[in-house]
Amino acid sequence: MGIVRLPDEDAARKLDEIVPVPSPTRTHFANSGTEAVETALKLAMHVTGREKFIAFFNSFHGRTLGSLSLTSSKAAQRRGFKRQALDVVHVPYPNEFRNPFNAADCADGGAGQGALTWIEERLFKTTTPPDEVAGIIVEAIQGEGGYVPAPANFLRGLRRICDEHGILLIVDEVQSGMGRTGKMFACEHYDLEPDIITIAKGIGSGMPIGACVARADLMDWKPGAHASTFGGNPVCIAAALKTIELLEQGLVRNSAEVGAYLKAGLEPLMRKYDCIGDVRGMGLMIGVEFVEDRVTNKPAPQVRDRVEAACFERGLIILGAGTNTIRWSPPLILSKENVDVALEIFDEAVAASSNANC
Ligand SMILES: Cc1ncc(COP(=O)(O)O)c(C=O)c1O
């Protein structure tokens, strides 16, 4: 009898090669993003023996009870589900366009420093002693929260804080991973090495698969500690392996090139329309934020909704993110010719949705 080589071993080996978590890694395959996050949470508790977590406002990490305790992008996602299952404290996300921190906390480091000060000077010294924190979970580019890239000093600072206090840094790349940002993972734009990374969505090209990849020395729990009946099933694993191959053969590069082309096409629209307050993002993960005008930058959710509908009527499907942002998150096979058509429709839709404030 020969040795049977399981396809999920191949996929785990491939992930070990491509994830920004320091090798060697171990992977647990699940069926969705939320399950990948649950794995990360359980692992962090198991390894550290601690049970508190730090997450960020406007984040989305899933809808099962553990990940829902982290999710904080809309009250509707929480309403009716009583108290959160896990001990999670939320910190404002360092949105540079809408810096939520006061100038003293930011010092010269902008919103990124403001968030670090909040954690170290406020949380750690009041409600959340660092030696009780199992993990900090963060999106390098906030997805559902409005396509908001993290400032580099913030992610560097989180890494330092985690190292200083034995806290695990969990980066959720369910939305930003698998080539979406023009690199395989958004973390790579920041040279950030998480302890644990969560992946889903794009890895299976539509097949239900999620993965939690962790440093091997962390994921050494014993058989029975964690499992999933359908996790790592051969059909989804085959889809993941093929997807990674296609990404490596050109789709990541395409995301970077066509994404830059799209962003360069959106930026002039910001100058043309006073209701576009910000164009931001990387690769094919770009946010366009709508405001009443660029003096007050007051959020304009109705304008955003009108633009979304006007695009739909003209044959372009785009989706909101956050309260007043449109997310551009097209398939990674997008061509520059597609972008030209999309930009023409978008321009027309913004013009048609304009009001006195726009
Ligand atoms: C960053 C992030 N994490 C986790 C999830 C949850 O993934 P799923 O819907 O596959 O459970 C999502 C879904 O939108 C997400 O964007």
Image: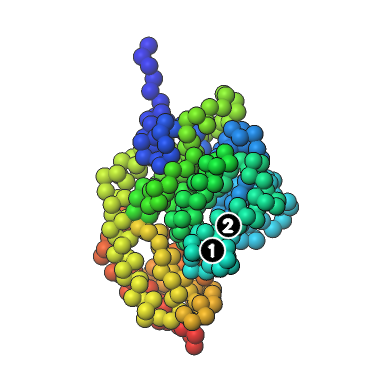
Q: Is residue 237 visible?
A: no
Q: Position of residue 75 (x, y in %)?
A: 65, 61
Query: Which comes sooner in the sequence, label 2 or label 1?
Result: 1
Q: Position of residue 159 (x, y in %)?
A: 49, 46
Q: Give the color scheme: rainbow, by chain, secondary structure or one colour.
A: rainbow
Mark carried by residue 117: 2
Rendered view: 236 above or below 323: above
The outermost residue toward the right is 82
Tag 1: residue type?
Answer: Cys
Mark carried by residue 341: none
Residue at numbered disc 1: 106
Q: Is residue 311 left or right of residue 104?
A: left
Report, in whole angstroms, how far the alpha carbon at label 2 lies from the one at label 1.
Answer: 7 Å
Specify the quadrant of the image occupied by residue 310: bottom left
- Which sits in the foreground, 98 or 212? 98
Query: Is disc 1 surrounded by few (<14), some (14 to 19) or many (20+) residues within 10 Å?
Result: some
Residue displayed at 58% across by 41% down: 165
Q: Is residue 227 visible?
A: yes
User: What is the secondary structure assignment of the residue under circle 2?
Assistant: helix
Specify the quadrant of the image occupied by residue 261: bottom left
C-beta proximity under 8 Å, tags 2 and 1: yes
Q: Position of residue 56 (x, y in %)?
A: 58, 55
Q: Position of residue 226 (x, y in %)?
A: 58, 31
Tag 2: residue type?
Answer: Thr
Specify the quadrant of the image occupied by residue 91: bottom right
Query: Is disc 2 surrounded by few (<14), some (14 to 19) or many (20+) residues within 10 Å?
Result: some
The outermost residue toward the bottom is 356
Residue displayed at 44% across by 56% down: 152
Residue displayed at 38% across by 52% down: 189
Rendered view: 37 above or below 256: above
